[in-house]
Amino acid sequence: MDDLDRELLTALVHDGRLTFQQLAQMVHLSPNSTADRVRRLRETGVIAGYHAELDLLGMGWTLRSLTDIKLMDHVERQDFERQLVDIAQVLSATHTTGEFDYQLRIVTTSTDGLQYVVDELRRLGAREIHTRIVLGEVLFDQTRLLRPPLGPRR
Protein backbone atom coordinates (compact mmCIF):
# COMPACT_ATOMS: atom_id res chain seq x y z
CA MET A 1 0.00 0.00 0.00
CA ASP A 2 1.43 3.36 -0.98
CA ASP A 3 0.56 6.99 -0.21
CA LEU A 4 -1.96 7.14 -3.08
CA ASP A 5 -3.82 4.14 -1.68
CA ARG A 6 -3.85 5.84 1.71
CA GLU A 7 -5.33 9.00 0.16
CA LEU A 8 -8.02 6.96 -1.60
CA LEU A 9 -8.87 5.09 1.59
CA THR A 10 -9.05 8.30 3.60
CA ALA A 11 -11.46 9.82 1.09
CA LEU A 12 -13.62 6.68 0.99
CA VAL A 13 -13.77 6.39 4.79
CA HIS A 14 -15.15 9.93 4.91
CA ASP A 15 -17.56 9.38 2.00
CA GLY A 16 -17.98 5.86 0.63
CA ARG A 17 -20.30 7.16 -2.10
CA LEU A 18 -17.64 9.12 -4.00
CA THR A 19 -17.48 8.27 -7.69
CA PHE A 20 -14.26 7.20 -9.38
CA GLN A 21 -14.31 10.56 -11.18
CA GLN A 22 -14.48 12.46 -7.87
CA LEU A 23 -11.80 10.27 -6.30
CA ALA A 24 -9.56 10.72 -9.35
CA GLN A 25 -9.78 14.51 -9.04
CA MET A 26 -8.89 14.33 -5.35
CA VAL A 27 -5.77 12.20 -5.87
CA HIS A 28 -4.79 13.57 -9.30
CA LEU A 29 -5.11 10.28 -11.22
CA SER A 30 -7.21 9.25 -14.18
CA PRO A 31 -10.62 7.75 -13.34
CA ASN A 32 -9.50 4.39 -14.82
CA SER A 33 -6.34 4.24 -12.71
CA THR A 34 -8.35 5.23 -9.66
CA ALA A 35 -10.94 2.52 -10.35
CA ASP A 36 -8.15 -0.06 -10.75
CA ARG A 37 -6.62 0.90 -7.42
CA VAL A 38 -9.98 0.77 -5.60
CA ARG A 39 -10.75 -2.64 -7.16
CA ARG A 40 -7.35 -3.93 -6.02
CA LEU A 41 -7.99 -2.64 -2.50
CA ARG A 42 -11.35 -4.48 -2.49
CA GLU A 43 -9.89 -7.70 -3.93
CA THR A 44 -7.08 -7.78 -1.36
CA GLY A 45 -9.57 -7.25 1.47
CA VAL A 46 -8.32 -3.83 2.55
CA ILE A 47 -11.77 -2.43 1.72
CA ALA A 48 -14.20 -4.81 3.41
CA GLY A 49 -17.37 -3.11 2.18
CA TYR A 50 -19.47 0.02 2.10
CA HIS A 51 -22.31 0.80 4.48
CA ALA A 52 -24.61 3.46 5.84
CA GLU A 53 -23.86 4.64 9.36
CA LEU A 54 -26.93 4.94 11.59
CA ASP A 55 -27.33 7.72 14.15
CA LEU A 56 -28.40 5.80 17.26
CA LEU A 57 -29.39 8.93 19.18
CA GLY A 58 -31.44 10.14 16.23
CA MET A 59 -33.23 6.79 16.22
CA GLY A 60 -34.16 7.17 19.89
CA TRP A 61 -31.53 4.85 21.40
CA THR A 62 -30.48 7.38 24.03
CA LEU A 63 -29.07 5.15 26.78
CA ARG A 64 -25.78 3.43 26.04
CA SER A 65 -24.01 1.02 28.35
CA LEU A 66 -21.04 -1.30 28.60
CA THR A 67 -21.91 -4.54 30.33
CA ASP A 68 -19.50 -7.21 31.52
CA ILE A 69 -20.88 -10.75 31.68
CA LYS A 70 -19.66 -13.83 33.50
CA LEU A 71 -21.46 -16.97 32.32
CA MET A 72 -22.64 -19.81 34.55
CA ASP A 73 -20.32 -22.81 34.36
CA HIS A 74 -22.80 -25.00 32.48
CA VAL A 75 -23.46 -22.42 29.70
CA GLU A 76 -21.69 -23.10 26.41
CA ARG A 77 -20.16 -20.01 24.81
CA GLN A 78 -21.54 -20.85 21.33
CA ASP A 79 -25.07 -21.31 22.70
CA PHE A 80 -24.90 -18.00 24.54
CA GLU A 81 -23.68 -16.17 21.41
CA ARG A 82 -26.34 -17.78 19.23
CA GLN A 83 -29.12 -16.63 21.58
CA LEU A 84 -27.58 -13.20 22.14
CA VAL A 85 -28.18 -12.34 18.49
CA ASP A 86 -31.92 -12.21 19.22
CA ILE A 87 -31.53 -9.25 21.61
CA ALA A 88 -31.59 -6.28 19.22
CA GLN A 89 -30.32 -3.85 21.86
CA VAL A 90 -26.96 -5.66 22.04
CA LEU A 91 -24.75 -3.98 19.43
CA SER A 92 -21.67 -6.11 20.02
CA ALA A 93 -20.33 -8.85 22.25
CA THR A 94 -16.59 -9.16 22.73
CA HIS A 95 -15.33 -12.45 24.14
CA THR A 96 -12.53 -11.49 26.52
CA THR A 97 -9.88 -12.82 28.84
CA GLY A 98 -9.83 -11.91 32.49
CA GLU A 99 -12.52 -11.81 35.13
CA PHE A 100 -15.46 -11.64 32.71
CA ASP A 101 -16.35 -13.73 29.68
CA TYR A 102 -17.85 -10.94 27.54
CA GLN A 103 -18.16 -7.20 27.27
CA LEU A 104 -21.38 -6.08 25.60
CA ARG A 105 -22.23 -2.75 24.02
CA ILE A 106 -25.92 -2.15 24.66
CA VAL A 107 -28.30 0.61 23.59
CA THR A 108 -31.77 1.18 24.97
CA THR A 109 -34.33 3.96 25.17
CA SER A 110 -34.58 3.97 28.98
CA THR A 111 -33.41 2.36 32.20
CA ASP A 112 -36.51 0.13 32.00
CA GLY A 113 -35.24 -1.06 28.61
CA LEU A 114 -31.82 -1.75 30.11
CA GLN A 115 -33.43 -3.73 32.94
CA TYR A 116 -35.25 -5.84 30.34
CA VAL A 117 -31.94 -6.62 28.61
CA VAL A 118 -30.27 -7.50 31.93
CA ASP A 119 -33.15 -9.86 32.75
CA GLU A 120 -32.78 -11.49 29.33
CA LEU A 121 -29.02 -11.93 29.88
CA ARG A 122 -29.72 -13.70 33.17
CA ARG A 123 -32.21 -15.96 31.37
CA LEU A 124 -29.47 -16.82 28.83
CA GLY A 125 -27.10 -17.89 31.58
CA ALA A 126 -25.28 -14.81 32.83
CA ARG A 127 -24.17 -15.44 36.40
CA GLU A 128 -22.64 -12.01 37.02
CA ILE A 129 -23.51 -8.75 35.27
CA HIS A 130 -21.69 -5.45 35.76
CA THR A 131 -23.16 -2.52 33.82
CA ARG A 132 -21.74 0.95 33.34
CA ILE A 133 -23.74 3.75 31.71
CA VAL A 134 -21.82 5.54 28.96
CA LEU A 135 -21.67 9.28 29.67
CA GLY A 136 -19.73 10.17 26.56
CA GLU A 137 -17.63 8.59 23.87
CA VAL A 138 -14.64 9.75 21.87
CA LEU A 139 -14.77 8.09 18.47
CA PHE A 140 -11.67 7.95 16.32
CA ASP A 141 -11.63 7.82 12.56
CA GLN A 142 -10.39 4.55 11.03
CA THR A 143 -7.99 6.52 8.86
CA ARG A 144 -5.78 6.67 11.96
CA LEU A 145 -4.76 3.13 11.00
CA LEU A 146 -3.24 4.46 7.77
CA ARG A 147 -0.59 6.36 9.76
CA PRO A 148 2.58 4.68 11.00
CA PRO A 149 1.93 3.19 14.45
CA LEU A 150 3.79 4.28 17.56
CA GLY A 151 6.22 1.74 18.97
CA PRO A 152 7.20 -1.59 17.44
CA ARG A 153 5.05 -2.88 14.62
CA ARG A 154 4.38 -6.60 14.81
Image: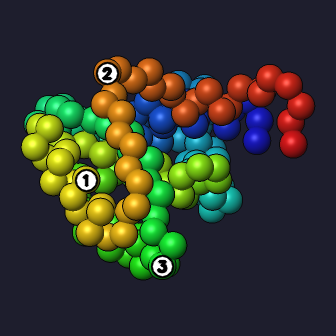
Say whether disc 1 or disc 2 marks the residue closer to the N-terminus.
1
Look at the numbered disc 1 and give the secondary structure of its residue. Answer: helix
| CB within 8 Å, label 1 to label 2 | no
- From the image, which quarter does the C terminus lie in? top right
In the image, 64 versus 111, the foreground residue is 111
Spatial separation of the CA atoms under disc 1 and disc 3? 19 Å
Which residue is pictured at 32% across the width and 37% down the height? 65
Which residue is pictured at 47% across the width and 42% down the height? 20
Residue 140 in picture, x, y percent from top left: 50, 25
What amino acid does circle 1 point to?
Val
Give the residue at mark 3: 74
What amino acid does circle 3 point to?
His
Spatial separation of the CA atoms under disc 3 and disc 2? 34 Å
Residue 124 in picture, x, y percent from top left: 32, 70
Does residue 136 appear left or right of residue 3 in this picture? left
Say whether disc 1 or disc 3 marks the residue closer to the N-terminus.
3
In the image, 80 versus 3, the foreground residue is 80
- How busy is the neighbourhood of tag 2: few (under 14 within 10 Å), some, or many (20 plus)? few
Say whether disc 3 or disc 2 marks the residue closer to the N-terminus.
3
Give the residue at mark 1: 118
Quadrant assignment, res 128: bottom left
In the rendered picture of this protein, how many numbered marks are placed on residues? 3
What amino acid does circle 2 point to?
Leu
Residue 45, label in figure:
none
- How busy is the neighbourhood of tag 3: few (under 14 within 10 Å), some, or many (20 plus)? few
Look at the numbered disc 2 and give the secondary structure of its residue. Answer: loop
Give the residue at mark 2: 135
Mark in front: 1 vs 3: 3
